[in-house]
Amino acid sequence: MLDPNFTPFPLLNTERLLLRPIVTEDVNELFFLRSNKEVMKFLDRPFMQYSEEALQLIQKITTDITNNDGITWGITLKNESSLIGTIGFWHITKEHHRAEIGYMLHPAQQGKGMMQEAITTVIDYGFAVMKLHSIEANVNPGNTNSIRLLERNQFIREAYHRENYYFDGKFLDSAIYSLLTPFC
């Protein structure tokens, strides 16, 4: 069985980014991301209404890291402290050596290759350090930017589920993408 250990927290660096822990001081930036219509357009989750909800999410992220059940990094520009996004393995299926990746980025930073830098680094960490066998992404089929990002990183569409998710009064479709370890 997979036995991840996120202590000490793994700081990850890219050319322009630092991937670091999400801390309570990030509450305003996280609240912005989770309440912004552009960022949340394809997340199919309720918008945050109050900053306390962002604090609760930070506590859940911290608990998941402490229990080695998931890991989420805050994305910042190097030499800046402001959170511009998040990325992580929020759902780890230890018995199957599989994790689900999720990510979001501030609208002002989109289209600049930032998420490409972050996802490459996180995928490498997942396979090389965590010893994952596969990484999954569950995507709203309308999110063509996310699908292009996944396909650019060699993810393959494994499934298309029609109306399998009920949100905001509608049944929605899901596309499942996956990437197998290159270390087989």
Image (cartoon, rainbow, N blue to C red):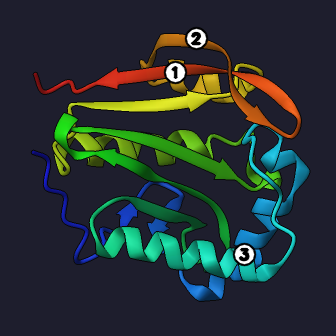
> Residue 3 occupies which quadrant of the picture?
bottom left
Amino acid at the residue labelled 3: Glu
Q: Is residue 96 left or right of residue 9?
A: left
User: Residue 39 at what x, y percent from top left?
Assistant: 79, 49
Precedes in sequence: disc 2 or disc 3: 3
Foreground: 126 or 49? 49
Q: In this view, does 134 lie above or below 101?
A: above
Which residue is located at x 83 percent, y 40 percent?
A: 41
Q: In which quarter of the image is residue 123?
A: top left
| Residue bearing mark 3 | 53
What secondary structure is found at the residue carrying circle 2?
A: strand
Are the residues at dot 2 and dot 3 in contact (C-beta closer than 8 Å)? no
Q: In the image, residue 73 lies at what x, y percent?
A: 47, 63
Query: Which three-letter amino acid code belongs to the residue tagged 1?
Result: Ile
Mark earlier in primary sequence (2, 1): 2
Residue most extreme to the bottom: 25
Mark 3 residue element = helix
Label 2, label 3: how far apart the Cα atoms are:
31 Å
Q: Do the residues labelled 2 and 1 touch (CB within 8 Å)?
A: yes
